[in-house]
Amino acid sequence: MVDRGRIVRRVAWLVAAAALIGWAALALRPKPIPVEAVAVTEGPLEVTIAAEGRTRVRDRYVVAAPVSGLLGRLRVRRGDWVAAGQVIGQISPLPLDPLDPRQKSTAEARLRAAEAALREANAGIDQAESALALAARERERTERLVESGDLPRQGLDEWRDRETSARQNLTAARARALAVAAEVDVARAALLPLTGRPTRAGEASLPLRAPTAGRVLTLHQESQRVVSAGTPLLEISDPAYLELVVEVLSTDAVQVTPGARVIVDRWGGDQPLHATVRLLEPAAFTRLSALGIEEQRVNVIADLLPEERPRASRLGDAYRIEARIVLRETPRALLVPLSALFRRQEDWACYVATPDSTLAERRLTLGDRGERYAIVRSGLQAGEKVLLHPRNDLSEGVVVTAGP
């Protein structure tokens, strides 16, 4: 007869052994590693160049002093709107300083000497005219004698030369008289502060007018002072017509073409502004980077779209901006995050979380790369989950727990 108790004990031992083995297997099984994964999707991609820049008024007018003189206090302030032709200030000739006795005596002596030289020059003109008249009469008399055969031809040539020389001497005498007369005028002008009425500040003032309608950007001269001709006084422009000046590396500038889209971020508004590239300046310049490295940079000039000007009215001249210049656009492509990529020899690779929660390494062929994503030509399919920021201790076949 079968011993049922013995059978029950054996079954119990077998169940306990199986449970022990299962517990040991679970205990020795590697724990899943939590990782962050996202699904590969399709979407648009923009290849851009990000750089800092500034705003700049497109048409800037500098009003300068047309003559030297005493500039009165300007009638405008920074930020004032002015009309074309509006009087914005006055500039007056400087008052003449009186001469001291020594300067007066010297000036009077120079005037007397100049007047005496003028009388001498006029006398020289009289002598030259007399000499010319005598030479002309002798030449005419000699011509008659030569025609009658009483004198040889040689005598006529001599008097003709004398007449020509006398005419030249008369021309020189008249030129000297003109030069001496100018010296007399200069000597008389030196005595004007004494002989004439002194000029007062404000007399015969010249009005300064705005060359165009616009807003006063800068005042170079705010107080009354003496200025020289050509001294900058103020700057006027219409801030509604702003252009963007974006500094890019010369190696990036060769990829930018006129008409490219520009997206302006971090300018102070809630939404980005949009512009288009108008031109690239033909010359580069040297700029030190934050690390102290010399870089060759080029100014890219862009114009805001007309519909953006109302929102950009809060911007002024030389405001800082951050811009992205769009080089290429792909409307639809398979995209993988750049943070999921790593190098494997000469290829790009990523880890894919398979349905059985293990990792699989994939070699990829990439296309254009943007700021956050790259185009996948081969190696992935839409919907597959790729690991973000893969760690060095991960490898193919590792069990993971993929989360968002």
Image: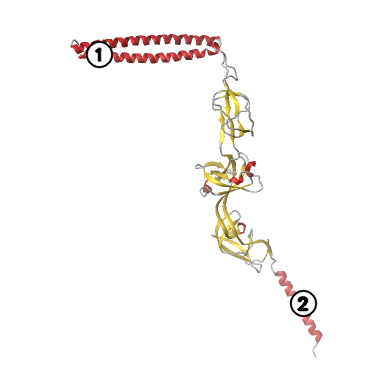
Q: Residue at x 75, y 77 (%)?
A: 17
Q: Secondary structure at mark 1?
A: helix
Q: What residue is shown at x 38% (from left), y 9% (from top)?
A: 123
**How busy is the neighbourhood of tag 1: few (under 14 within 10 Å), some, or many (20 plus)?**
few
Mark 2–mark 1 Cα distance, whole angstroms, equals: 155 Å
Number of labels in the image equals 2
Quarter of the image where one finds residue 313: top right
Q: Is residue 137 left or right of residue 253?
A: left
Residue closest to the eye, 25 or 379: 379
**Quick one: SS at disc 2?**
helix
User: Where in the figure is residue 133, as x and y percent of width and height?
Assistant: 31, 10
Q: Quadrant of the C terminus?
A: bottom right
Q: Which amino acid, mark 1?
A: Glu
Residue under numbered circle 1: 158
- Say which amino acid is labelled 2: Ala
Tell me if residue 286 comes above or below residue 25 in the rendering.
above
Q: Earlier in the sequence, mark 2 or mark 1?
A: 2
Q: Is residue 163 above or below residue 296?
A: above
Q: Residue furthest left?
A: 149
Question: Dot 2, crowdedness within 10 Å: few (<14), some or many (≥20)?
Answer: few
In x, y percent, where is residue 107?
A: 50, 11
In the rendered image, the residue lying farthest to the bottom is: 1
Query: Residue 7: x and y, percent?
Result: 78, 84
Q: Is residue 244 left or right of residue 28?
A: left
Q: Quadrant of the N terminus?
A: bottom right
Image quadrant assignment for residue 290: top right
Q: How is the image coloured?
A: secondary structure
Labelled disc at residue 16: 2
Q: Are marks 2 and 1 in contact (CB under 8 Å)?
A: no
Relative horizontal placement of residue 313, taking residue 148 as reference (left or right): right
